[in-house]
């Protein structure tokens, strides 16, 4: 509030006249009432009223002045910000006009008279806010088509635009539903003048909307893609809702699409339990789907808007094929079942390297004592360098061409790093050279590949891995042995294992327990009980006495992940019946998918929203040893995938070239400025200095501003109240604007002026004097005084 005070003008001769009048009139007032007798209380009331009236007249002779400060006319600015977003197209319950129409009526025509009142004192600066803050000449530009409500950014723009200027306040007309604020938390408001939010909207409206869509992908064989859909339907309690998902654009329909789910909202807020939709996409790669809510049978709902009934989403199923290298020390049942199981998954390509026979000493003719060479070659150079042993007999299965694995296990990073995961089974450490074991460790730690070592006679501690470079990557201490379990052993998931979908076969715990109880026992297990601190035991084997040993242990190692299976005859569980065989195959597929999850490709592409709008595309390229690849050229092609045909929505394919990022070798970025709502797919081709293509990657994203803009339709009064509190303003309604315009000149402002008004010029003072004498006369008549 402005400062105000009562001052006295220099009275001159009028001061003595006022004093004389008081000396004469006050005794006369007492004498006029004194003959009334002993009724002193009655006399006192009449005397007090008469003295008060005389006192006011005497004070008027002293010419008191009411002095105050006010905003200097024309010297201060007042910003008026009107929300232009699409959420103002909503019609509140019981209203005939939309929020936007009511706002327009309050800003134009007769309803905008308060702006004229405001303009008598302030320089009014009209603004619109939706995607950004815009200065306008007047509010005729309101069309309520803004796809976003960037209120947080708009306040920052206001502060920067009017820094150092005499901005007295901001009148903020909005429903308060900002799309750029996390949990409704306003940014730093320091430096802003008082903000007066004017709430648009009466409350919750009748509407069904998708509030949240959460996508989850797991290696669980039955449900590799799960979408949790949260729906709110205020005003629609008891209505039957149907939630469905369908492919969008060029995405292939799944073989078994998820059926629509039913939900019934309850209570005034239309609380609806979250709905899970599970399905298995037909192919890999980037895919687009649309989740929609409608009435029973897909019928339209009687609601405020249908624009928030759909939500597009993107799912990245990874590369079309993941290559897994299986290295086996001998042919066995496990490879047969593993190969059969992974063949059912089109994204998993198992390549086998099996040792059919160990290497044996070569038969040699020896010469004289101490001579190790064949005497037939005596006199020929290089005879002593002839190989003394045969090579092992290796069989290659599912190789890509005749050259793949021809020389046995890979000896270079370029060859090994083409695989995404490696599975070792009953093969001893002596099968590999020390360099190959180090290469395996690098494969996990640097390349980010997956490694699994299956139990058996020549695996884990029985394979001599304890003192090798690979021992650090394994989740168990191989040099700390315990008594090996014996007898019939039962497979039991641990508490952590129950929480991992890829360790289970059934989705419900009770069903999984029944399945495990029906399986036959295993009889070959390792006696390793020392688990490394960073590892997790996901399953155990339990003997008849209740003692347990780790059966499935996993850990992160560097950029990759490692699993150790401490059971050597898991295949026995698949021999019970056909259902058990199918479950075993599912377990192998889930283990394989877990191994390749998050394994990077040589070229990756990530799409991220940019704070300024648009999308930033980040390309990462690696060489054959998965080191940052430099001197590369990344060319991106961006297409809309939700149009019936290219160009149907006015958008054609866009080609961009990514620029290298300083201080980030192998990384380049491009900026796509498109803001049109839709689903987008970007494909990048990265070529080396010689022009050869290093790799290709794709990414997808969805621009759906209406989903966030209309996520909440009720005005956010709490957020607007916090805005007013932190800046010293107050929350108002449209009906309060006229009163606010009248009060604002008397409130604090950067530029003020002082003014004085004679107190006697106020009609209230005259009425007070007249009231005192009239009240005194009526009192005397009522009490019977003369």
Image (cartoon, rainbow, N blue to C red):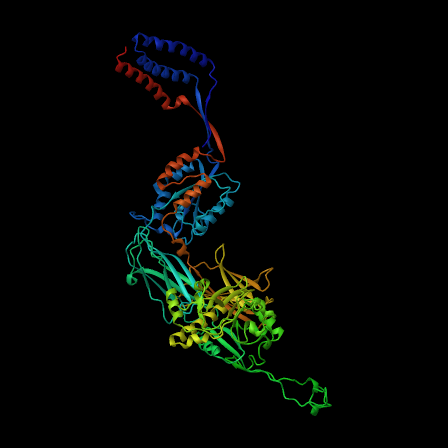
Q: Which residue is drawn at 40% across and 45% down?
A: 718
Left or right of 688? Residue 227 is left
Q: In this view, does 404 lie above or below 50?
A: below
- Which residue ends up furthest to the front in the rendered image? 545
Q: Which residue is drawn at 41% across and 37% down?
A: 118
Q: Position of residue 528 (x, y in %)?
A: 53, 68
Q: Can residue 651 be seen in this view?
A: no
Q: Can residue 57 be seen in this view?
A: yes
Q: Position of residue 343 (x, y in %)?
A: 45, 76
Snapshot quadrant of residue 494:
bottom left
Q: Position of residue 330 (x, y in %)?
A: 53, 80
Q: Nearer the viewer, residue 100 or 600?
A: 600
Counting labels gives: 0
Quarter holding the N terminus is top left
Q: In this view, does 567 lie above or below 774?
A: below
Q: Is residue 114 above or below residue 314?
A: above
Left or right of 140? Residue 595 is right
Q: Is residue 613 above or below residue 778?
A: below
- Which residue ends up furthest to the bottom in the rendered image? 376
Q: Nearer the viewer, residue 45 or 513?
A: 513
Q: Position of residue 411 (x, y in %)?
A: 60, 75
Quarter holding the C terminus is top left
């Amino acid at each position: 509030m402005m400062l105000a005070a009562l001052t006295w003008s220099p009275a001159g001769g009028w001061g003595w006249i006022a004093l004389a009048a008081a000396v004469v009139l006050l005794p006369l007032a007492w004498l006029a009432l004194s003959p009334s007798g002993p009724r002193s209380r009655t006399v006192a009331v009449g005397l007090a009223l008469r003295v008060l009236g005389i006192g006011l007249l005497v004070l008027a002779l002293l010419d008191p002045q009411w002095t105050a400060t006010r905003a200097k006319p024309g010297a201060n600015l007042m910003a008026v910000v009107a929300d232009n977003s699409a959420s103002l197209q909503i019609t509140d319950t019981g209203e005939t006009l939309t929020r936007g129409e009511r706002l327009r009526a309050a800003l134009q025509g007769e309803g905008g008279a308060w702006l004229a009142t405001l303009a008598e004192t302030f320089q009014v600066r009209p603004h619109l806010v939706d995607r950004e803050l815009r200065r306008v000449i007047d509010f005729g530009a309101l069309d309520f088509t803004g796809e976003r409500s960037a209120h947080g950014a708009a306040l920052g723009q206001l502060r920067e635009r009017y820094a150092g200027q005499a901005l007295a306040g901001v009148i903020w007309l909005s429903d308060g539903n900002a799309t750029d604020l996390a949990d409704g938390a306003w940014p730093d408001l320091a430096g802003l003048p008082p903000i007066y939010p004017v709430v648009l909207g009466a409350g919750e409206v009748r509407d069904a909307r998708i509030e949240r869509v959460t996508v989850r992908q797991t290696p669980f064989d039955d449900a590799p893609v799960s979408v949790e859909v949260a729906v709110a339907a205020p005003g629609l309690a008891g209505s039957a809702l149907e939630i469905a998902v369908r492919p969008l654009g060029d995405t292939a329909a799944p073989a078994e699409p998820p059926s629509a789910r039913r939900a019934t909202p309850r209570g005034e807020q239309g609380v609806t339990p979250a709905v899970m939709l599970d399905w298995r996409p037909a192919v890999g790669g980037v895919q687009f789907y649309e989740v929609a809510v409608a009435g029973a049978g897909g019928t339209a709902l009687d609601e405020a808007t249908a624009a928030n009934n759909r939500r597009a989403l993107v799912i990245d199923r990874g590369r079309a094929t993941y290559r897994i290298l299986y290295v086996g020390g001998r042919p066995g049942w496990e490879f047969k079942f593993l190969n059969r199981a992974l063949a059912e998954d089109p994204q998993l390509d198992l390549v086998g390297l099996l040792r059919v026979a160990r290497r044996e000493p070569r038969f040699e003719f020896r010469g004289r004592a101490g001579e190790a060479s064949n005497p037939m070659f005596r006199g020929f150079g290089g005879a002593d360098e002839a190989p003394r042993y045969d090579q092992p007999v290796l069989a290659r299965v599912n190789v890509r061409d005749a050259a793949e694995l021809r020389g046995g296990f890979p000896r270079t990073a370029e060859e090994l790093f083409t695989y995404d995961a490696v599975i070792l089974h009953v093969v001893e450490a002596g099968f590999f050279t020390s360099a190959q074991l180090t290469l395996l460790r690098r494969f996990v730690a640097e390349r980010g590949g997956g490694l699994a070592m299956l139990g058996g006679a020549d695996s884990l501690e029985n394979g001599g891995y304890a003192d090798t470079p690979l021992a650090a990557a394994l989740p168990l201490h191989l040099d700390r042995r315990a008594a090996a379990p014996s007898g019939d052993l039962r497979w039991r998931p641990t508490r952590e294992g129950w929480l991992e979908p890829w360790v289970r076969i059934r989705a419900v715990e009770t069903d999984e327990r029944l399945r495990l109880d029906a399986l036959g026992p295993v009889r070959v297990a390792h006696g390793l009980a020392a688990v490394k601190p960073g590892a997790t035991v996901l399953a155990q084997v339990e003997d008849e006495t209740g003692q347990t040993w780790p059966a499935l242990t996993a850990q992160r190692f560097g950029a990759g992940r490692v699993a150790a299976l401490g059971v050597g005859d898991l295949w026995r569980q698949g021999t019970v019946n056909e259902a058990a065989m199918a479950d075993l195959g599912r377990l192998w597929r889930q283990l394989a998918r877990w191994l390749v999850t998050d394994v990077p490709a040589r070229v990756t592409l990530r799409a991220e929203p940019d704070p300024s709008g648009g999308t930033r595309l980040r390309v990462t390229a690696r060489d054959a040893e998965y080191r940052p690849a430099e001197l590369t050229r990344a060319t991106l092609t961006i297409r809309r995938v939700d149009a019936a045909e290219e160009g149907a929505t006015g958008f054609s394919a866009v080609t961009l070239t990514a620029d290298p990022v300083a201080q980030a070798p192998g990384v380049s970025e491009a900026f796509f400025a498109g803001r049109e709502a839709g689903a987008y797919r970007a494909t990048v081709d990265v070529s080396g200095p010689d022009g050869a293509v290093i790799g290709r990657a794709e990414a997808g994203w969805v621009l759906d501003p209406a989903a966030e803009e209309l996520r909440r339709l009720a005005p956010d009064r709490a957020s607007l109240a916090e805005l007013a509190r932190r800046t010293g303003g107050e929350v108002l309604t449209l009906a309060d604007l006229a009163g606010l315009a009248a009060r604002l000149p008397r409130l604090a402002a950067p530029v003020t002026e002082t003014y004085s008004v004679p107190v006697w010029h106020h009609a209230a003072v005259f009425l007070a004097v007249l009231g005192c004498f009239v009240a005194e006369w009526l009192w005397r008549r009522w009490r019977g005084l003369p």
